[in-house]
Image (cartoon, grey):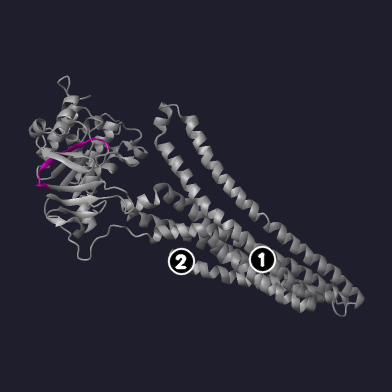
Amino acid sequence: MIKTLAKSIREYKRSAIATPIFVSLEVVLECIIPFIIAALVSEIQNGCELSVIFKYGGVLIVLAMLSLLFGILAGITCAKASCGFAKNLRHDMFYSIQDFSFANIDKISTSSLVTRLTTDVSNVQMAFMMLIRVAVRSPFMLIFSFVMAFIMGGKMAMIYFFVIPVLGVGLSLIIKKAHPIFRSVFKKYDAINSSIQENIKGIRVVKSFVREKHESRKFDTAANDVCRDFTRAERILAFNSPIMQLCMYSVMVFVQLFGSYIVISTNSTDLNVGQMSALITYSVMMLMSLMMISMIFVMLTLSAESCKRIAEVINEKSTLTSPENAVFTVKDGSIEFDNVCFRYSETAERMALSEIDLKIRSGETIGIIGGTGSSKSTLIQLISRLYDVSEGSVKVGGLDVREYDLESLRNSVAVVLQKNVLFSGTIKENLRWGNKNATDDELIEACKLSCADEFISSFPDKYDYYVEQGGANLSGGQKQRLCIARALLKKPKILILDDSTSAVDTKTDALIRHAMKTYIPETTKLIIAQRTASVEDADRIVIMDGGKIAAVGTHSELLESNEMYREIYFSQNKAGGDEQ
C-alpha cells in the first residue's frame, strides 16, 4: 500500500525531501535558544556587563530569525508536496478508473469511487502533510529536548522515563479502539454518496411523486448513522487530551517543586535559576511534541483506511485486457455467438445468458425483442467486450473478440445505449465524440439522418448550443437522436441501437432506420426494441426469453410460427396502428 501511494509523489519528491530537512534545522535552532537563554540568565546572575547581554541578545535574534526562515521554507515546501501528492493521487485514480471494465465498476460501485476521489484523498493529503512536517518536527523536538533536559537538569530529567510509557500505553489503547470505527464509517460515507447521487439523478421523479420528505428522511438516516459512528470515535479520541494534560502538568509540578527545592537548598550550585527555566522550557517543548505525536497517530488512524481504499483503486486491474499479440483490424461486421453462457459474477446464482448460438452476416439488420429482464442488453454488451463470456465465445469478423486489441474492437462497434448520455458542452463537442475530426458538413449530415437537424436548427446558437450536464436542457427524444448521430459519425462496422428510439414517434423511428440503411449499408445493425414496428423490416428478428434465444426469423415467419411474437405484435396493433 505504501509503495503504491509513494509512486504518486513523483515530481514533488524534492519538496517532500526538503521539508524534513528544513524542519530539522528549525528544531535544532529552537532547542539551542533555551540553552543560550539559560547561559544569559547565569551571566546576569554573575553580574555581567551590558555588552555581554547585547552579545547574547544578538545571537538569540539571529537564531530566532534563522528558525523562522527555516519554518517558512518548510511550510512552503510542505504545502507544495502535499497538494501535489493529492493532485497526483486523483490523477492516478482517475486514469485507473478509465481502464476499468464494467465488472470492476460493479465490484467497487460508483458512489464509493466518488468518495475515494474526494474525502479519502483529502484525508491522505492531510496525513502526508503531517508526516513530512509534524511527524519529523515532533520526534526531533522530543529527542533534542530530552538530550538538552538531561544536560541542564541531570537526574531530575528521569521523570520523562515514567511519563512516556504512560502516554504510549494510552495512545495505543485509543488507536486500537478507534481504528475499526473509522474503517466502518467510510462504507457509510459511500452509502451517503450513493443516496445523494441517486436522488439528484432522479430529482424529477422525486418531485413528480412528491417524495421529497421520504428522500430527506432516508438521507437523514444515513447521515445520522455516520454522525453516530464519528461521535463514538471522537469520544474515544477525546481521551487523548486529558492523558496529555495529566502527564504535562505532572511533569511541570515535579520540575517546579523539586527544581525550586534544589536551587534553594544547594544555593544554585547543583541547579541555578537559568538551568531551571531552561528545564521548564524543555519540559513544555517535550510534552507539546508528545501531544503533536498523538495527533499524528490520530490522523494516521483516520487516514489508514483511506490509504487502503485509494491503493485498492490504483492497484485494481481491469478484468478485460488486450492480449499480447492482439489483432488491430476488424475485417467486417459479421458476428457469431457460439454456445455462449454468461453470468455477471462468479458468485451469481444463475446465468444471465444460456446456450446462445447465433450467426449474423456482415451488413445484416437484426432486430432483438423480448420482455423486460430477458437479457437483450446483456447480449449486445458481449460484442464490444464490455464483459467477457463465462462459457463459449463471441466472434466478430471471424475472430474471437478476446483476440482483438480492445481499443480497435470498440472503435469498430458503435453503441447507442438505452440510457442516453450527453456531456456538458456544445452540440458539436458532443457529436465529435463519434469522430473527433468530423467536419461541420459531416455533423450536419449525420444529424439530418438521425432527424436531429430539425430541432438543432431551431436553437439560437444552432450547433454551438450549450448542452447542460447529462443533457438536462434537452428532451428524451432529442437526446436519443443526438446519440444516434454521434454513433453514425463513427461509421462503425457494427451499430447497436439499445432501445434508442423509444422516445421518438414511429414516423421519426422509421425515417431513422431508412437513413441508416442507405447511409451505412455495409454496417451490421442490431436494433433492440420494445415495439415490433422498430424491427419489422429487419432481415431477421431474435426473440429473447429468460436469457435464451426463443426464436429467430423474419417478421412474417415469426407472426406465423411464434406465439410470443404474435402476442406482442397484436397487443401493440389492436387498432391497426403502432403504439404511441
Asked if residue 359 is positioned above or below residue 212 in the image, the reply reads below
Q: Residue lying farthest bottom? A: 269
Q: Nearer the viewer, residue 153 or 25?
A: 153
Residue 388 at least partly seen: yes
Residue wearing tag 1:
169
Residue 385 within the magenta-colored segment of the rendering: no
User: Would residue 13 appear left or right of 393 to someone viewing this image?
Assistant: right
Asked if residue 215 is positioned above or below residue 520 in the image, the reply reads above
Residue 361 within the magenta-colored segment of the rendering: yes
Give the image location of residue 474, x and y in percent.
32, 32
Q: Residue lying farthest top? A: 575
Residue 83 at least partly seen: no
Q: Which mark is residue 14?
A: none
Give the image location of residue 57, x and y in percent.
76, 71
Give the image location of residue 284, x and y in percent.
74, 66
Q: Which residue appears at 56% of the width and 58% of the height?
A: 179
Q: Measure how far apart labels 2 and 1 are at the Cα level.
A: 30 Å
User: Would residue 423 appear left or right of 288 to someone viewing this image?
Assistant: left
User: Would residue 117 appear left or right of 321 to someone viewing this image?
Assistant: right
Asked if residue 380 is positioned above or below residue 390 in the image, the reply reads above
User: Would residue 545 appear left or right of 49 to someone viewing this image?
Assistant: left
Sort mark 2 into few (<14), some (14-19) or many (20+) by Cα contacts within 10 Å: few
The amino acid sitting under disc 2 is Ala
Q: Which image quarter: residue 166?
A: bottom right
Q: Nearer the viewer, residue 364 or 44?
A: 364
Q: Earlier in the sequence, mark 2 or mark 1?
A: 2
**Magenta residues?**
359-372
Picture mark count:
2
Looking at the image, do the residues carrying marks 2 and 1 touch, with CB atoms under 8 Å apart? no
Give the image location of residue 502, x and y in percent.
24, 32
Q: Which image quarter: residue 265?
A: bottom right
